[in-house]
Image: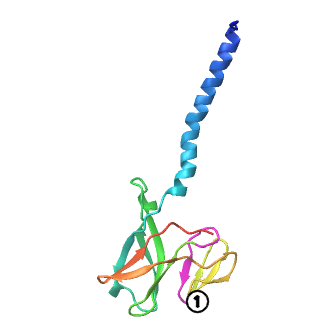
Amino acid sequence: MKLEKITRRRFLTGISFGLAAASAALVSVPVIGSILVPLFRRLPEVWRSVGHVDSFEVGKTVPVVFQNADPLPWAGVSAKNAAWLRRVSETEFVAFAINCMHLGCPVTWLPDAELFMCPCHGGVYTKDGEVAAGPPPKALARHQVRVRNGEVEVLTMPIPIA
């Protein structure tokens, strides 16, 4: 059995390839993790109070603000979500996501026209959140709403964008 002599060039080439492979492995771990973790992570569902039942007038649509289900400690103002809440009857409420289903721009409620308008791209929604005109592919997303102990609560959810 004859032993092959390793040259300095071959040795350094092997070390270079080994270090490059180790570096690539170290860099790929967080990249692959950031891709895979959202696939397996279950988003928390948290009911957030938006006000007392008596503070909402029947037939009126008003903006409400509440905290996200999983705010990060450094999120600041971006840890807040908003919705359009309407008191339909004495016991029934409906809440629409404030984001247009086209590109996520915030929609505005126009009470005189009873329409939601997206000022960015001309999306128009009826008072029931259905698409009336413009580019949005589907109706405004709805939050689940419940009344508990005299408080109106909204179920948080990620910002829905088509």
Frontmost residue, 2 versus 58: 2
Is the C terminus in the top left, top right, bottom left or bottom right quadrant? bottom right
- The answer to whether residue 63 is left or right of residue 27 is left
Residue 116 % position (x, y):
58, 81
Dominant SS type (magenta): loop
Q: In which quarter of the image is residue 20?
A: top right
Report crowding for label 1: few under 14, some 14 to 19, many 20 or more residues within 10 A (C-alpha).
few
Q: Quadrant of residue 156?
A: bottom left
- The colour scheme used here is rainbow
Frontmost residue, 156 versus 117: 156
Which residue is labeled 1 in the image? 113
Quick one: which residue is furthest to the left in this view? 149
- Tell me which residue sits at (33%, 87%) in the image: 54
Q: In which quarter of the image is residue 4?
A: top right
- The answer to whether residue 43 is left or right of residue 11 is left
| First to last magenta residue range | 100-114
Residue 137 % position (x, y):
67, 75
Is the N terminus in the top left, top right, bottom left or bottom right quadrant? top right
Does the segment drawn in magenta span residue 111?
Answer: yes
Q: What residue type is labelled 1?
A: Ala
Q: Is residue 137 above or below residue 10?
A: below
